[in-house]
Image (cartoon, rainbow, N blue to C red):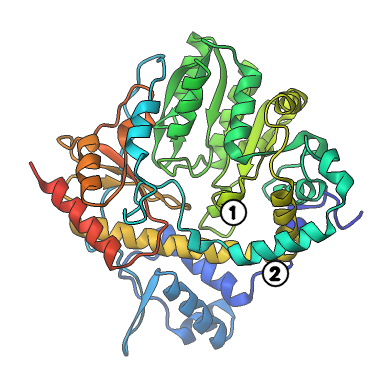
Amino acid sequence: MRASDPLESPDTILTRVSGFPMKRYEQFAEQMAGLIRGGVLPPGQKLPSVRQAARTHGVSLSTVFEAYYLLESRGLITARARSGYYVRATAQHPLPEPGPAAPPAPTSDVDVSELVFSVFGSLKDPDIVPFGSAFPSPELFPLARLARSMSHALHRLAPDTIIAEMTEGNAELRRQIALRSAGFGIRRPLDELVITSGAMEALNLCLQCLTQPGDLVAIEAPAFYASLQVLERLKLKAVEIPVHPREGIDLDYLEDCLQRLPIKACWFMSSLQNPLGASLSDERKQALYALLVRHRLPMIEDDVYAELHFGDRPPRPVKSLDTEGLVMHCGSFSKCLAPGYRIGWVSGGRYSEAIQRLKLMTTISPSIPAQAAIADYLQHGGYDRHLRKLRHELESRQSSMLASAARHFPEGTRVTRPAGGYLLWFEFPERVDSLQLCRQAMALGISLAPGPIFSATRRFGHCARLNSGHRWDERKELAMATLGELLHQP
């Protein structure tokens, strides 16, 4: 079997693609981080001494030291003089998590674009604290290294490939995506994979292949506001499925809707859902796929945050279970590597040919140089090393925002604790009007994403999404204190 064969085992693929296996101290640090995330080592708990940990786990003293230093840099533990290492108390009284949303109306026309535009019209101002942004800080991305990849790739780009690869996309990039996908449990043929102008084009193409104006589409509640805008543009009706902040979509409610309503497709994020950060367990993903098969229902799987998980193993998408070609799996490099390059992809299953034809009728091709640059970076740039650093930094910044919220926000506030990404969903006391809060905060130089833009029926009026993916500093801490003062107002 050739080294580039996409049918190799996932573990072999991951090792070969990264070329940078985890060191022993990184593996040990990840084991300890898992115990902290799972609550086995709660806030304030003292960690085993370096000598004790070395004896217990059969590693060297230097391995434990390096692992503890790494955990400290990630904000998970803290050292106390002459006492040892302790799990960082992210808050003396951590905020509780939200409960599941109430069932929504059966179906709804979608009309959110004006509200979204009015909320985000001033986000380009660099003086605004970007808690309302949908992207992490650009400082987290290897832009200089990508530029070198761009130069290197352009020198090697054969003129005839510029035309030949316009529809499906750069052959090497598609091969690299297929190789990485094997690590997520997806065995997809290269001819099923289409490169798109970001994930949004992929998601748009999928929905257009499946629906006609007036059709019903099952979406999450709350849902990413851009998905609502797509439904609005295509004149589709939304069937909102409640999402539990930790367990994901309500499968019983979905099944009831499928039995009662002529739903033509569903659009879900099975891992690190935006805005809640919820992830379905493997068992619940299997149950969801069984529902799709039973009802012969196609699913558009929006998986743009897959690489931003905090654990040592990536969550497997529903697409990894797909034997019927019902799941249209969409991804992107915009949230994890290169936001401005606008390179995404879709693996369309039984709908791949229809997607390719529709793409040829619309945008034809994303930037060929950008595709070649990312392909070169995936081969030679140390992508997995970048991702590990990115995940560690995002986890530290999430911890900082959670601690700050516990210090400043009023009693009755609840917040999610996603196992990855950089988005936090806050549920404030019922008296809070998040649209009014948004206007007041913007007047003081702070953005946030109010709850109603995440619902076709403009629910979640006392909720908001905040972005924790920017460098935590005195300015961000002061912004959280200011939001707390606004939230305390009667």
**Residue located beneath label 2 in the image:** 20
Residue 27 horizontal/vertical position (percent): 59, 70
Q: Amino acid at mark 1?
A: Ala
- Camera-side residue: 478 or 278? 478
Q: Amino acid at mark 2?
A: Phe
Image-based side of 360 in relation to 481, left or right: right
Residue 441 horizontal/vertical position (percent): 22, 47
5 above or below 301?
Answer: below
Q: Is residue 271 visible in this depiction of the protein? A: yes
Query: For the residues marked 1 and 2, what is the alpha-carbon distance in whole angstroms?
Result: 21 Å
Secondary element at tag 1: loop
Q: Quadrant of the C terminus?
A: top left
Q: Residues within 10 Å of mark 2 (few under 14, many from 20)?
A: few
The numbered disc on residue 338 is 1
Q: Residue at x 54, y 28 (%)?
A: 267
Q: Where on the picture, by quarter, is residue 43?
A: bottom left
136 above or below 232?
Answer: below
97 above or below 40?
Answer: above
- The answer to whether marks 1 and 2 mark residues whose Cβ atoms lie closer than 8 Å is no
Residue 370 horizontal/vertical position (percent): 69, 51
Q: Residues within 10 Å of mark 1 (few under 14, many from 20)?
A: some
Mark nearer the N terminus (1 vs 2): 2
Q: How many marks?
A: 2
Q: Is residue 324 visible in this depiction of the protein? A: no
Residue 73 horizontal/vertical position (percent): 44, 74
Image-based side of 330 in relation to 279, left or right: right
Secondary element at tag 2: loop
The numbered disc on residue 486 is none
399 above or below 159?
Answer: below
Q: Quadrant of the N terminus?
A: bottom right
Q: Residue at x 70, y 69 (%)?
A: 20
Image-based side of 139 in relation to 405, left or right: right
